[in-house]
Image (cartoon, grey):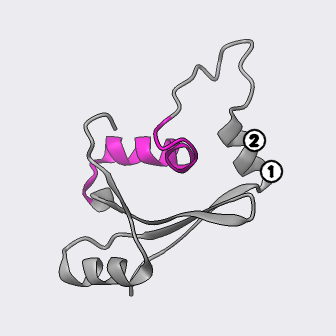
Amino acid sequence: MEEKKLEWIDCGLDEWRKYVENNDDPAKYYIYRYDGGIRQEGYYKGEFKLNVEDEEHFEEYFNDYFYYGYPNYRDKNHPNADGSECEMAFGSGTSGVTSFEWE
């Protein structure tokens, strides 16, 4: 997503609710937890305006966006490739993301 089609908005529930109510953007609210604590809360402005290709990219690197703040491009087929720190953190349950939508 080098084109910056998504913008992370770090905010609380009230600010997110006001944004969703006042804009034509049903943004999901995300809570990212790491090592037992909340590290990030907010939404991605523009997520529901992504085209199919960009949406697939976002889904593929979803955990990376929270863990690193950007996609971690690496050759998973390289003979010496091990799991990334992100994959290990999410795989072990140390990291996790909860999301919900305003109804």
Q: Position of residue 8 (x, y in %)?
A: 36, 56
Query: Amino acid under label 1?
Result: Ser
Q: What residue is pinned by disc 1?
A: 92
- Quarter occupied by the N terminus: top left
Task: Specify the quadrant of the image occupied by residue 56.
Answer: top left
Tell me if 69 is positioned left or right of 91 in this view: left
Q: Residue at x 73, y 31 (%)?
A: 83
Q: Position of residue 20 (x, y in %)?
A: 28, 78
Q: Residue at x 26, y 46 (%)?
A: 5
Query: Amino acid under label 2?
Result: Met
Q: Where 14 falls versus 4 (above or below)?
A: below
Q: Secondary structure at mark 2?
A: helix
Judged from this view, the residue extending furthest toward the left is 23
Tell me if 21 is positioned left or right of 16 in this view: left
Q: What residue is pinned by disc 2?
A: 88
Q: Residue at x 37, y 84 (%)?
A: 14
C-alpha separation, residue under disc 1 versus residue under disc 2: 6 Å
- Quarter occupied by the C terminus: bottom left
Foreground of the two, 69 or 55: 69
Q: Residue at x 48, y 36 (%)?
A: 71
Cβ atoms under marks 1 and 2 closer than 8 Å: yes
Q: Position of residue 54 (x, y in %)?
A: 33, 43
Foreground of the two, 12 or 27: 12
Q: Is residue 62 found inside the magenta-colored segment of the image?
A: yes
Give the magenta part as a residue range. 49-71
Q: Where 100 falls versus 1 (above or below)?
A: below
Judged from this view, the residue extending furthest toward the top is 79
Task: Specify the quadrant of the image occupied by residue 86.
Answer: top right
